[in-house]
Amino acid sequence: MDHSLKIFILSGEASGDTYGAALMQALIQKVPSISFIGAGGSKMQIAFLSKQIESSKLENQEASNTNFHPQTTDPHHPIKQFENWIEESAVVGLWDVLKKYSYFRAKFSQFLLQLQEEKPEAIILIDYPGFNLRLAQAIRRQKLPIKIFYYISPQVWAWNKNRIPKMARLLDLMICIFPFEKELYESSGLPTTFAGHPLVETIMASQKETPPLLRENDLLGLFPGSREREVRHLFPIMLQAFRELTQVDSKIRCEAAAATPYLAAMMQSMVREAGVLISITIGKAPELMQRATFGLVCSGTATLEAACYALPYALVYKVAWLTYVVGKQLIRVPFLGIINILAGHLIVREFIQREATPRALAEEALRYLTDPQACEQVSKQLTEVTSTLHGQGAYHKAAATIISAL
């Protein structure tokens, strides 16, 4: 492999940041001389900087042998080449995108210029289809000699299958995490690899190394999402649902998982306003998913994570009405939650928009909090679904596929 191999890697969401960082580490293990540019979140930036530190050590050793001392005032200094933009880029729905249109337009131009100047051998796009597919189209339109790889397929099978042939013309490789996606893309002529779902693999591996925590009776877990808008929309409803539950059964306790200290502070304020007693932890959703009897979970990656821990839960989601109306016209699958989609039938109830009321959530939670047999039945179904997503070393398989395609 060429020692000068350079990869542009781009993610715009928190889950993609996790996947991207691990993929970067896997690529480094296979090609130690590889270099990265691009944008993501803090995890991808740490992976980038760790690689730069190792490279700098080697360069400094060589420089000391020749009495050469590199200057860090270079405008192309490594820290400038990988941006943490997740706080701004992780938006939900059409309305949020429209409000930040000028920001995204500027970033689009910035990344395209960076690709033109840096001339990487390939770009790895991670999920985030609204932005990433447009960038892929711009790369092709400008005829840049860059291979385009997509990791974590956008769920076009849910909202617009007609885009798949277009994606086949734009992309050189698709690496998917759901088994049914492979045939879907390959039928349009797009080389596709099923690598396994990295989140499922990570959880399963950790469960083998560390005994799972014991479930606690009468414990409700709240998981209101990793974005500020999600928390603002959902957490007050979840708190009111808990209040109604305590009026029925005073033994019921509640804990909530916050994704960041900022969101935790926001949630604490909401708890005080609601006048309920709830413990909030930061970055400990996996622990709460193992301990809780039942969960109220924001739609997204957290629902799959809850399923991996066999936690009975209800999916909850509310977005701006413009986003909801447009999305309802586009969605081509009967469910929003990936577990229900994979199963082909309803396993976990979905409470969306007007259906996401405190009373409805309280009634659903009470049904499971008071019925161990119902919990056991749903837990078994969740385990059956997630067992289909196992691969063999998802990140390393993805990395090997990318390297072999270069």
Image (cartoon, rainbow, N blue to C red):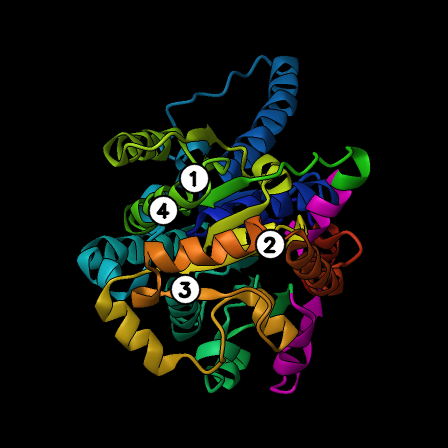
Distance from Cα at disc 1 to Cα at disc 4: 51 Å
Question: Label 4's element?
Answer: helix
Looking at the rendering, the stretch of residues picked out in magenta corresponds to 178-206
Q: Which label was assigned to residue 351?
A: 3
The answer to whether residue 278 is magenta is: no
> CA–CA distance between discs 1 and 2?
43 Å
Q: Are marks 3 and 4 in contact (CB under 8 Å)?
A: no
Viewer-side residue, 189 vs 19:
19
Question: 238 or 364: which is nearer to us?
Answer: 364
Tell me: 81 left or right of 228: right
Query: Percent from the top left, x then y, of residue 248?
Result: 42, 45
Of label 3 and label 1, which has the lower sequence position? 1
Q: CA distance from mark 3 to mark 4?
A: 17 Å
Q: Nearer the viewer, mark 3 or mark 1?
A: 3
Which callout, 1 or 4, points to the residue nearer the camera?
Answer: 4
Of the image marks 4 and 2, the number of the one nearer the N terminus: 4
Q: Identify residue for label 4.
A: 244
Name the foreground residue: 29 vs 315.
315
Say if 386 sits above or below 38 in the image.
Answer: below
Give the percent coordinates (x, y) of residue 116.
40, 57
Name the residue type under label 3. Phe
Mark 2: secondary structure:
loop
Badge 4 vs badge 2, beta-carbon distance below 8 Å: no
Which residue is painted at 35% across and 35% down in the image?
263
- Residue marked by disc 2: 312
